[in-house]
Image (cartoon, rainbow, N blue to C red):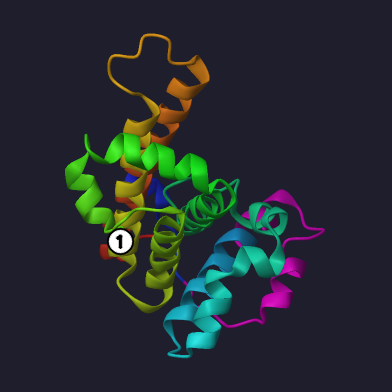
């Protein structure tokens, strides 16, 4: 998908309380749901970047905990990867994966970091890279969406996906399960998409 495909008219977000986001996506036709996905993404990011309230930032980072993964998926998971809602969905999903499967994530990170050192440095995981450090990193990425350089946050997440992809496919192992190879390919695709989103954000074209 080209970067131009992610372009759409930008409307300055108008804040709505978190509890109202659920109602935006319910009982509407497909065209309205597309518009709602972009509108809610703009609301969440715009509200987060317009405030210096750490409590609100923490609530936005914990949006999945507050609304539930199914609600967040309903809002954003169907949107193209190189759009604002598509990028947000992938960031929240990565954070949930790290929290829910800490041992798997640590194993893949350990397997991949030595063969993806440039990406490891970009990610910036604290040493030692235990589950708490990895979860803290994805939390920092989401915090950066709202109170830092969003493009840098996307690039850190992309680098993390690259390390995970390398960890999924160990060299010299002949019997890697096909589903694991597929997961690695999807991780690389996600990394490419998040990198593209970072470029689009810098061009004021991620909507």
For image coordinates 34% across by 14% down, the residue present is 173
Is 169 in front, or is 161? 169
For image coordinates 18% across by 43% down, the residue present is 117
- The location of residue 56, given as percent across then percent down, is 54, 84
Is 153 within the magenta? no
Q: Quadrant of residue 114?
A: top left
Residue 203: tell me if it is visible: no
Is 107 in front, or is 14? 107
Residue 112: tell me if it is visible: yes
Is 27 in front, or is 21? 21
For image coordinates 55% across by 74% down, the residue present is 60
Which quarter of the image is occupied by the C terminus?
Answer: bottom left
Is 19 within the magenta? yes
Image vertical order of residue 189 relative to residue 85, above or below = above
- The location of residue 22, given as percent across then percent down, is 74, 67
Q: Quadrant of residue 26?
A: bottom right
Is 118 in front, or is 27? 118
Q: Which residues are magenta?
A: 11-35
Residue that label 1 marks = 126
Image vertical order of residue 169 relative to residue 82, above or below = above
């Amino acid at each position: 998908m080209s970067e131009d495909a992610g372009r759409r008219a930008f409307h300055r977000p108008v804040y709505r309380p978190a509890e109202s986001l659920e109602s935006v996506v319910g009982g509407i036709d497909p065209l309205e749901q597309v518009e709602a996905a972009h509108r809610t993404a703009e609301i969440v990011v715009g509200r987060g970047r317009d405030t210096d309230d750490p409590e609100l930032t923490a609530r936005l980072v914990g949006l999945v905990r507050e609304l539930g993964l199914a609600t967040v998926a309903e809002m954003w998971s169907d949107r193209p990867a190189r759009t604002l809602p598509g990028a947000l969905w992938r960031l929240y999903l990565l954070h949930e994966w790290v929290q829910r499967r800490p041992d798997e994530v640590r194993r893949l990170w350990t397997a991949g970091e030595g063969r993806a050192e440039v990406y490891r440095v970009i990610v910036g995981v604290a040493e030692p890279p235990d589950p708490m450090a990895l979860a803290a990193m994805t939390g920092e990425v989401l915090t950066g969406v709202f109170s830092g350089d969003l493009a840098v946050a996307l690039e850190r997440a992309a680098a993390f996906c690259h390390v995970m992809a390398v960890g999924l496919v160990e060299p010299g192992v002949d019997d890697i399960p096909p589903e694991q190879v597929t997961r690695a390919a999807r991780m690389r695709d996600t990394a490419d998409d998040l990198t593209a989103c970072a470029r689009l954000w810098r061009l004021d074209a991620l909507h």
